[in-house]
Amino acid sequence: MPMVRMRLIGSREDADAVINALHGLDGIEHVEEVDDLTPTMRDDSSSSELVDDSEGKIYYVEVEASNANRVDAVQNVAEAIGRERGMVVEFVEEF
């Protein structure tokens, strides 16, 4: 079954809105938020200990779909909610 992996950059509320909407789609086997196992360091600054310039947090989500049509639906729903809420949705092959 196809797997869709995405990074959601925004607030906890934004990420929950996407996750809840995806749970409601037909043909979705599971939706899971994955913990980021490796802490990220800012490599654009020597002040990596400082608060990030961005207010958004990154949420990693995996969605198992039943077929390619459902993959398209997952991507369309995530992008639509992302636009509506002003968040970033990035689809990736692996985290």
Image (cartoon, rainbow, N blue to C red):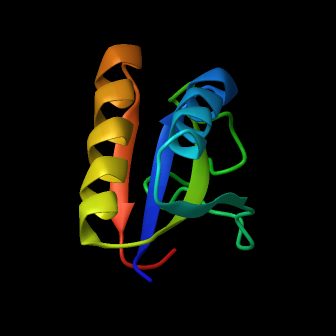
Q: Nearer the viewer, residue 27 or 79?
A: 27
Q: Is residue 35 above or below residue 56?
A: below
Does residue 91 appear left or right of residue 14 in this picture? left
Residue visible at 49% across and 44% down?
Answer: 8
Residue visible at 75% across and 72% down?
Answer: 37
Q: Nearer the viewer, residue 67 or 77?
A: 67
Asked which quadrant contains residue 79, the reply is: top left
> Residue 94's x, y, as percent?
45, 79
Residue visible at 38% across and 40% down?
Answer: 78
> Residue 73's x, y, as percent?
30, 49
Q: Nearer the viewer, residue 29 or 36?
A: 29
Asked which quadrant contains residue 51, the reply is: top right
Q: Is residue 52 above or below residue 64?
A: above
Does residue 35 appear left or right of residue 40 in this picture? right
**Number of residue marks:** 0
> Residue 36's x, y, as percent?
70, 65
Instruction: Point out the residue furthest to the front here.
Output: 26
> Residue 86's x, y, as percent?
36, 19
Does residue 48 appear left or right of residue 89 in this picture? right
Q: Is residue 94 above or below residue 80?
A: below
